[in-house]
Image (spheres, rainbow, N blue to C red):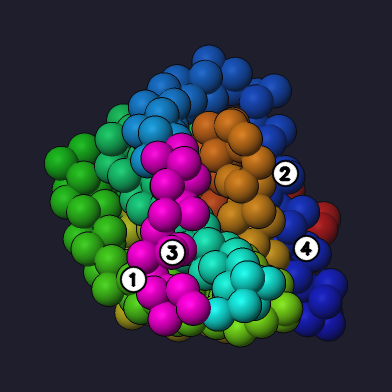
């Protein structure tokens, strides 16, 4: 399968996750609760950033105070966009981590249902407190690279004309990769696959994983999208994990 087809196959796996709304609507509704809580907190922060973005852009570019008005405005608009792009990337990734930690009992129900639809549920599934510990560890592990990528995208966004576009595109792919790595954690942990092995397995099907992750990332940008998509993304992570590990299931065998 070509890389392009693999990528769109990954996109398709996310949308197959939405079918869980039909097979387990009660569990999916429960999955909305932690997402709503975290989304409300982040929305307040993002609104605060948007309200003060002009002031922040001016504070970040004191050197442009004496410039011609057109160039000063162009520079500060680029800086403002760079702030927003970096903030969106960081929010999307920390949103996933916090939501998975807070909503662990709810998402484990979604995950178990999705596993049962495509084969036996792994026997090595972690308990509640171990899952919370794994989620916190994973979140801390992602913190440094997330900040570094956010800074890099901020710097890229400062490039006139094309910088914001390139930063947005790269943000979707980089953010999508991190999201996929985070969302598949429960399914991999349940199979006794450690963090390093998980990364190696995901890299072996990079286009597929990027398709799933980038689609999730972009839907997270839609207003209230993260709330609705989060339970479906958890369900779809089972499909991604099974395909990456080459597990044979009746449902997947017809689409490989």
Earlier along the polypeptide chain: callout 2 or callout 3?
2
Regarding mark 1 in the picture, which secondary structure is present there? helix
- Residue nearest the viewer, comparing 92 with 208: 92
Earlier along the polypeptide chain: callout 1 or callout 4?
4
- Cβ atoms under marks 1 and 4 closer than 8 Å: no
- Residue 203 location (% of width, % of height): 54, 81
Can residue 186 be spotted in the picture?
Answer: no
Earlier along the polypeptide chain: callout 1 or callout 3?
3
Magenta span contains residue 63: yes
- Residue 3 location (% of width, % of height): 78, 81
Give the residue at x 35% y 78%.
148
Earlier along the polypeptide chain: callout 2 or callout 4?
4
Which of labels 1 and 3 is toward the front? 3
Magenta span contains residue 124: no
- Residue nearest the viewer, comparing 222 with 206: 222
> Between marks 3 and 4, how big is the CA–CA gap?
44 Å
Q: Label for residue 9? A: 4
Regarding mark 2 in the picture, which secondary structure is present there? helix
- Residue matched to label 3: 58
Classify 10 Å Cα crowding around label 4: few (below 14), some (14-19), many (20 and above).
many
Examine the rendered structure and indicate whether residue 211 appears above or below residue 126: below
- Residue matched to label 2: 16
For the image, the number of numbered tags is: 4
Which of labels 1 and 4 is toward the front? 1
- Cβ atoms under marks 2 and 4 closer than 8 Å: no
Q: Label for residue 147? A: 1
Q: Quadrant of the C terminus?
A: bottom right
């Amino acid at each position: 399968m070509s890389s392009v087809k693999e990528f769109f196959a990954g996109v398709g796996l996310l949308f197959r996750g939405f079918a869980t709304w039909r097979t387990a609507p009660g569990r999916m509704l429960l999955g909305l609760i932690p997402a709503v809580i975290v989304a409300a907190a982040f929305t307040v922060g993002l609104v605060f950033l948007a309200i003060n973005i002009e002031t922040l852009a001016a504070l970040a570019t004191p050197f442009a105070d004496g410039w011609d008005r057109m160039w000063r405005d162009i520079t500060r608009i680029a800086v403002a966009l760079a702030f927003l792009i970096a903030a969106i990337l960081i929010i999307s990734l920390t949103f996933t981590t916090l939501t998975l930690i807070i909503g662990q009992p709810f998402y484990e129900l979604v995950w178990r249902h999705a596993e049962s639809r495509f084969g036996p549920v792994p026997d090595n599934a972690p308990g509640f407190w171990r899952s919370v510990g794994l989620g916190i560890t994973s979140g801390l592990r992602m913190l440094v690279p997330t900040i570094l990528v956010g800074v890099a995208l901020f710097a890229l966004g400062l490039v006139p004309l094309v910088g914001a576009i390139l930063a947005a595109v790269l943000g979707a792919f980089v953010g999508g990769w991190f999201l996929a790595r985070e969302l598949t954690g429960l399914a991999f942990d349940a199979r006794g696959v450690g963090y390093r092995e998980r990364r190696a397995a995901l890299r072996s099907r990079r286009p597929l994983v990027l398709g799933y992750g980038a689609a999730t990332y972009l839907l997270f940008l839609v207003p209230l999208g993260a709330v609705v998509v989060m339970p479906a993304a958890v369900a779809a992570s089972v499909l991604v994990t099974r395909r990456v590990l080459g597990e044979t299931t009746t449902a997947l065998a017809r689409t490989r």
